[in-house]
Amino acid sequence: GNSVTQMEGPVTLSEEAFLTINCTYTATGYPSLFWYVQYPGEGLQLLLKATKADDKGSNKGFEATYRKETTSFHLEKGSVQVSDSAVYFCALSDFTSGNTPLVFGKGTRLSVIA
Amino acid sequence: EAGVAQSPRYKIIEKRQSVAFWCNPISGHATLYWYQQILGQGPKLLIQFQNNGVVDDSQLPKDRFSAERLKGVDSTLKIQPAKLEDSAVYLCASSLADLSTEAFFGQGTRLTVV
């Protein structure tokens, strides 16, 4: 079946540090990949997505590249801010099998300190 | 554009009691999902509707959980009777019916069973 594994948290960084959150996936088909973010007290929001190999999703300074050869979709940001403190979820959906729902990783909590 | 609305935001009940959650998806979204998010884990799909029909309820504990979307718009998720392990955030999401489309999430209902 489909599954997502992402690095354990929490991750604590100083402002302006470089961020990487690792995500790998297992899928039977050819999935689309997503990063969702959950800010304190808010619902899940789509951060970025990629639908095919070598696509790069980007938003708000965050980037992730769909790597089919390593089945990975690592999230990166060059300079984090305090406002980036949140829980980040990697997810996939295998649309080749129909309108299938999202399968999520466990989430990684990021805390950025000034 | 109004987002996905959920109520209540918080609920505390005793074990063996019943509880119901309500969700109103974004207007025009044919697909509606209910997810369960236990503390420290990623959201897990409980049930997926396409209009008023069930697409996937394979992970719904049907002995105690039920859900309906009678008119293909808003939806209700019920737990009866509740167990301690049902303590979680219950997330509703909706999306357009076509493939490779984004799911939009509500803020969730935090359930505590004591």
Image (cartoon, coloured by chain):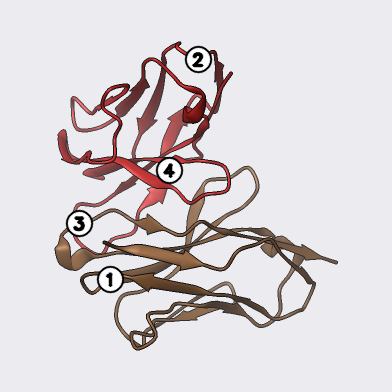
Chain colours: A brown, B red
User: In the image, are marks 2 and 3 on the same chain?
Assistant: no
State the CA–CA distance, disc 2 to disc 3.
Answer: 35 Å
State the CA–CA distance, disc 2 to disc 4.
Answer: 32 Å
Amino acid type shown at disc 3:
Asn
Amino acid type shown at disc 2:
Lys
Residue B26 picture location, percent across and down = 34, 42
- N-terminal label among 2 and 4: 4
Which residue, given by chain and number where applicable, does mark 2 sit on? Answer: B15
Please say if B49 is above or below A57: above
Dot 2: what SS?
loop
User: In the image, are marks 2 and 1 on the same chain?
Assistant: no
Residue B3's tag is 4
Dot 3: what SS?
loop
Identify the subunit bearing mark 3: A
Amino acid type shown at disc 4:
Gly
Q: Is residue B65 left or right of residue B98?
A: right
Q: Mark 1 touching mark 3, by CB under 8 A?
A: no
Mark 3 is surrounded, within 10 Å at the Cα level, by few (under 14), some (14 to 19) or many (20 or more) other residues, namely: many
Foreground: B44 or B33? B44
State the CA–CA distance, disc 2 to disc 1.
Answer: 39 Å
Which residue, given by chain and number where applicable, does mark 1 sit on? Answer: A31
Q: Mark 2 touching mark 4, by CB under 8 A?
A: no
Q: Which is in the foreground here, disc 2 or disc 3?
A: 2
Residue A99's tag is 3
Q: Which is in the foreground here, disc 2 or disc 1?
A: 2
